[in-house]
Structure formats: C-alpha cells, structure tokens
Image (cartoon, coloured by chain):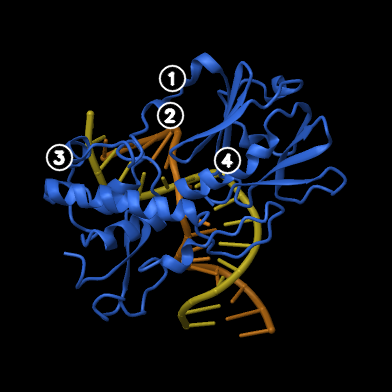
Chain colours: A blue, B yellow, C orange
Amino acid sequence: MPELPEVRTVAQVLKKLINKKIARININYSKIINQNSLDIKLLIGKTLKDINTIGKYLLFDFEEYILISHLRMEGKYYIKDLKLPLNKHEHIEFVFSDNISLRYHDTRKFGRMLLIKHEDLNKVESIAKLGSEPFTLSKEEFYNKINKKKIPIKSLLLDQTIIAGLGNIYANEVLFASKINPFKLGTEIALEEAEAILSASIKILNLAIKEKGTTIKSYTSSLNVVGNYQKHLKVHLKSGKKCEVCQSEILKTKIGGRSTYYCLVCQK
DNA sequence: ACCACCTCCTGATCGC
DNA sequence: TGCGATCAGGAGGTGG
C-alpha cells in the first residue's frame, strides 16, 4: 500500500505507538535492512517520539535515531498481540515494553528500512534528492523540471526527484483529471498544463488521504485499515469500461514498463 | 548527465 | 486441469 495517501494513513494509525519504548526486536529477513543502516537493535530501549512522512517514506523518530521505512510495493505494518505467531511474511518484529508487537509484513520483500542518526537525515541520498510534494511544489519549479525532458509525462510523474508522492494509481488518475495524454513528452507540456497537473494532484491526494487511501487487493489487516479511494477511480484498472465523461472506452497500455490507463478522447 | 532496461521477490491470474 | 507466462500500488543499480 505505497503511495502518499496510503503512507500517511499508515503513519496516522501507528501514532498510537508514540511514547512507547522498544523492548526487543526480531529480524527474520535481514535484506529488508538497507546495507548502509546502523544496527536496528540500537533501537532497543528507545522511545518512539513521533512519526512523520516525506513523499512515500515513513520516518519513525526514536530519540537520537530516525528509522526510515519505505514500503515499496507491498510493505505493511501490523500491530498484533505478542502471543500470535509470526506470519511467514512478517519479516521484522518490534516488541514494545507493554508487549505490543509491531510487525513489518512484506510479501514481495521489496521494502527497505534504514536506521540513521537524527542529524544525518540530510545525508540520505534518496531523501535529499526527493522533489517537493505537490502541496508545496510551485508550478514554475515543476514546469522547469519537466520541460527539457523528452520522457512521457506519465513517467515524469512517477519520478520522485521531480514530484514526491505519486505512484502508478494516482499518476493515472491525475492525468485523466488534468486531461493530458500520458504519452505527451515533458517538452510538450505547457505551463498551464503543468499547473493543471499540480492542482489535480493536490485535489486527488487530499481526497485520497481523507478516504484513507486506495485498497485494490482486499486483504485483512490487524490495522483494520481499508482505504476507500477505489470508489473514486476514473481510469485506473478501468480498461474496457466506459469513460465517465465521454463514454468512450478506457484504454490500457504500458509506459516505462508500468500499466497506464487513459481515455484517448478526453486526454489530449 | 541522461535514459532505457534489469533486478529485487512472491502469489494471483491469464492464456494456451 | 495443468502449467509456463505475465502481472502487481516501487525504486536502485547498470551500462550504453
């Protein structure tokens, strides 16, 4: 569950753990931990002070440390009773001193965690290179970042160094809402179109945050978080269905290897 | 520097 | 039904 609205939802739900102290940590699949990471077990005895997000990154503030977590395709956090045995996809377990068990679950094992000292946050390259989230990105800055690139706008929206937080679902939805063809190159996007993309991004992400994200594959989670944005989807996964605006058929194609859904008539 | 492609994994679904 | 191929909400690394 990995785009900005889903990550913010996870952060919101996990805030109930703030002010709890870590008693022990079990690591069952160590490749989840980034090679440059400090030893995760340094967190034992530390208290969770806050949880923040930047783009699709979760930032757990543990006193002098920050645990950076990226869910990638399928990472999830479950809060469970300590007594429940670990599921085969629960790779890291953080046990808090009141016996609450926080488990990192990741079927495809693509997610990564990185433990750093607080003051080193700006040295983490992936975070430092991150573009602004749509809420704070100016249309001029966005336009300047895309207007020399001969890359389809769909791929540019997925580039986190240009704009942070959009993933495949919301990139598809944003381009439909702003009536722009996903194949259109960055060089072909006018300033007004860049502005339309930004305002559509803000509107869509805000609604998706309110709806607690999009749940596509139904799954049961101890978090009991089921997003509801899927009822607002206009093009994503809608190939073969009729466009709500013009009634023509929603098409599916690949751009940069990612599934892209769009309406050829509405999106010029 | 830029960009297209490959890779990391598992499980569900597709197509013959 | 069987079974290999393809696909899935992401991004880091490689090499042209």
Q: Gap in Å between the C-alphas at discs 3 and 2?
A: 23 Å
**Label 1 amino acid?**
Asn
Q: Gap in Å between the C-alphas at discs 4 and 3?
A: 36 Å
Q: Chain of mark 1?
A: A
**Label 3 amino acid?**
Lys
Q: Which residue is mark 4?
A: A11
Q: Position of residue A154 (x, y in %)?
A: 28, 53
**Location of residue C4 with respect to A207 vertically, above or below:** below
**Location of residue A87 with respect to A145 vertically, above or below:** below
Q: Secondary structure at mark 2?
A: helix
Name the residue located 55 percent from the left edge and 23 percent from the top edge. Answer: A36
Answer with left or right where residue A99 lies relative to residue A105.
right
Residue A148 is labelled as 3
**Location of residue A188 with respect to A228 vertically, above or below:** above
Q: Gap in Å between the C-alphas at discs 1 and 2?
A: 7 Å
Mark 3 vs mark 2: give the one in front.
Answer: 2
Q: Look at the numbered discs 4 and 3 and tell me whether their residues touch, using CB distance below 8 Å.
A: no
In terms of sequence position, does the residue under pointer 1 or pointer 3 come before the other?
1
Quarter occupied by the C terminus of chain A: bottom left
Q: Look at the numbered discs 1 and 2 and tell me whether their residues touch, using CB distance below 8 Å.
A: yes
Q: Secondary structure at mark 4?
A: helix
Residue A127 is labelled as 2
Residue A195 is labelled as none
**Label 2 amino acid?**
Ile
Circle 2 Cα neighbour tier, 10 Å, few/some/many (<14 / 14–19 / ≥20): some
Answer with left or right where residue A201 lies relative to residue A195.
right
Which quarter of the figure has residue A142? Answer: top left
The residue closer to the viewer here, A81 or A157, is A81
In terms of sequence position, does the residue under pointer 3 or pointer 2 come before the other?
2
Mark 1 vs mark 3: give the one in front.
Answer: 1
Q: Are marks 4 and 2 on the same chain?
A: yes
